[in-house]
Image: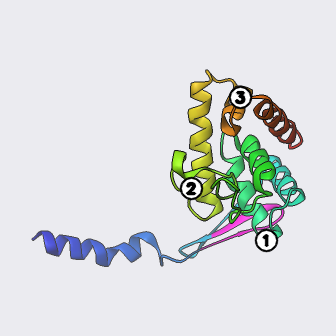
Amino acid sequence: MKICVMALAVCALPSICGSGEYSRKITPDAIVENRGGQHWVKQRSKLSKRIESFAVKYGADEMLAAEMAELLCALENGKVLAAIAAKESGFDVRALGRVGEVGAYQVLPKYWGDPGNNFSSQTEKADKILQELLDASNGDLAAALERYNGTGLKAKAYASSVLSLAAKIQ
């Protein structure tokens, strides 16, 4: 009996969920989605547009910058993460550092795990790292950014530089 119910549910799924067709396009002013034949249009926020311009200015591929911006503007610390990606790699998901750092945010896999090979997974990893560092720094963003980079005078300069870059997105 369970098999018949499951088979019925699977057969009914297309009528419940639509055709299963999905597409998404980001224009300069809107996000246009096709979900199973229904079209949805959402206006892009000013923050998303500012992050996109910032990303392109600091090295992001123009074809990917809008998608990156949409992802970043949905995060609490999206502007800071954009600044980290700009400073660390110029938004290059394939970047490799001299001591084993990888990706747009130059994450050290031996400490933080594999960040993945696309901007979305790397951003998710960097966001988790930043949250952990913020917790360890009692919410002090500058201190968390210093920890992101290491310790000492270079780390203080790094934190200051990232905060200055993030402020440019205002």
Q: Amino acid at mark 2?
A: Pro
Type of secondary structure dominating the magenta stretch: strand
Residue for badge 3: 141
Mark 1 neighbour density, 10 Å: few (under 14) some (14–19) many (20 or more)? few
Q: Are marks 1 and 2 in contact (CB under 8 Å)?
A: no
Q: Foreground: 3 or 119? A: 119
Residue segment shown in magenta = 23-33
* Secondary structure under the numbered disc 3 in the rendered image: helix
> Relative to 45, is 60 above or below?
below
User: Residue 104: image x %, image y %?
Assistant: 70, 57
Mark 3 → mark 2, Cα distance in angstroms: 22 Å
- Answer left or right for 14 relative to 34: left
Q: Is residue 68 magenta?
A: no
Q: Give the quarter of the figure containing the N terminus.
A: bottom left
Please give the label number shown on residue 115: 2
Q: Amino acid at mark 1?
A: Met
Residue 52 placement: quadrant: bottom right
